[in-house]
Amino acid sequence: MINCLVWNEFVHENNDAEVAAVYPEAIHGAIAAALGQDAELNIRTATLQDAEQGLTQENLDWADVVFWWGHAAHDKVDDELVAKLWNKIIFDGVGLVALHSGHFSKIFKKLMGTGCDLLWREAGEAERLWVVEPNHPIAAGLPNTFRLPHEEMYGERFDIPAPDELVFMSWFQGGEVFRSGCTWNRGRGKVFYFRPGHETFPTYRDANVCQVLRNAAHYCAKPAFAGVCKGSEAYGHRPNNLEPFTVGE
């Protein structure tokens, strides 16, 4: 079983009637429902309003992969909690799936080391996603292309490091293109950025998008070997030699 922590700032659903109408179960509820269609996934949800902003030590120790949706409250996330999550990713192999405007989250920017900015336009135009790496596990079960009738446009240039793998490209009705599905290895952890998911459109009920989320959970989850050798054992000063030697030989 894979433990999936779905984190959502949970701001728009409380303050915007249009968003609440699209996602009465909240965005984290919709993502949890999509993941829940896979019997191999355990799901918890957490929000900015929870104790320790949902990033308790117990939640971080439990999670194999964290799904992150944020937009209006990136600056409200505590830096110390971001550092804790960063350490879980780098040293323990916990995966991160950053969704839509999660590209501006503190944790994603810390992992990327860049500004993570982009072009955008909110006009409700169509988006067509193309699978450009069809043998990738995140693309399993998908057609070679699929269309979302209404989405927010994100366009290049996307200020990120070159992805280790580019799984999806998007084309928008207005003509822009965007690297919409990117993976990176960071320490022991895997990071996946997936672009679709604007709060005023029911994107997280699209069958193909839901398939991507489930595939990403499996791909990014903490590997089974992660608990064998902790970071404190893998790095740092080693006072005792493993093999005998004589100084000067």
Image: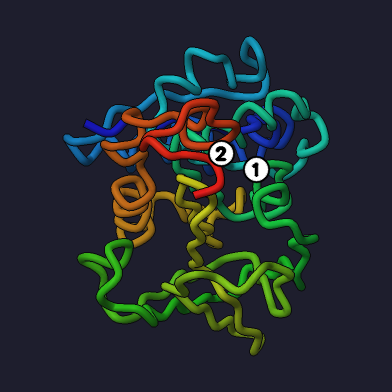
User: Can I make out residue 24 in this image?
Assistant: no
Q: Quadrant of residue 124?
A: bottom right
Circles 1 and 2 in contact, beta carbons < 8 Å: yes
Q: Is residue 52 left or right of residue 35?
A: right
Q: Amino acid at mark 2?
A: Ala
Tell me which residue sits at (59%, 21%) in the image: 55
Q: Residue furthest bottom?
A: 175
Give whichever of 246, 36 is nearer the camera. 246
Establish if 199 lies above or below 182. above
**Residue 105, x across and y down, in percent:** 70, 45
Q: Quadrant of residue 74?
A: top right
Give the colouring mode of the picture: rainbow
Give whichever of 104, 14 is nearer the camera. 104
Establish if 128 lies above or below 1. below
Tell me which residue sits at (51%, 60%) in the image: 184
**Residue 198, x across and y down, in percent:** 60, 54
**Residue 164, x across and y down, in percent:** 49, 70
Say which mark, if any, is on residue 18: 1
Say which mark, if any, is on residue 21: 2
Q: Residue furthest left?
A: 39
Q: Is residue 52 left or right of residue 239?
A: right
SS assignment at label 1: helix
Tell me which residue sits at (50%, 44%) in the image: 96
Q: Amino acid at mark 1?
A: Glu
Give whichever of 120, 249 is nearer the camera. 249
Give whichever of 73, 128 is nearer the camera. 73
- Crowdedness near tag 1: few (<14), some (14–19) or many (≥20) residues, C-alpha within 10 Å: some
Tell me which residue sits at (55%, 62%) in the image: 195
Q: Is residue 59 left or right of residue 3?
A: right
SS assignment at label 2: helix
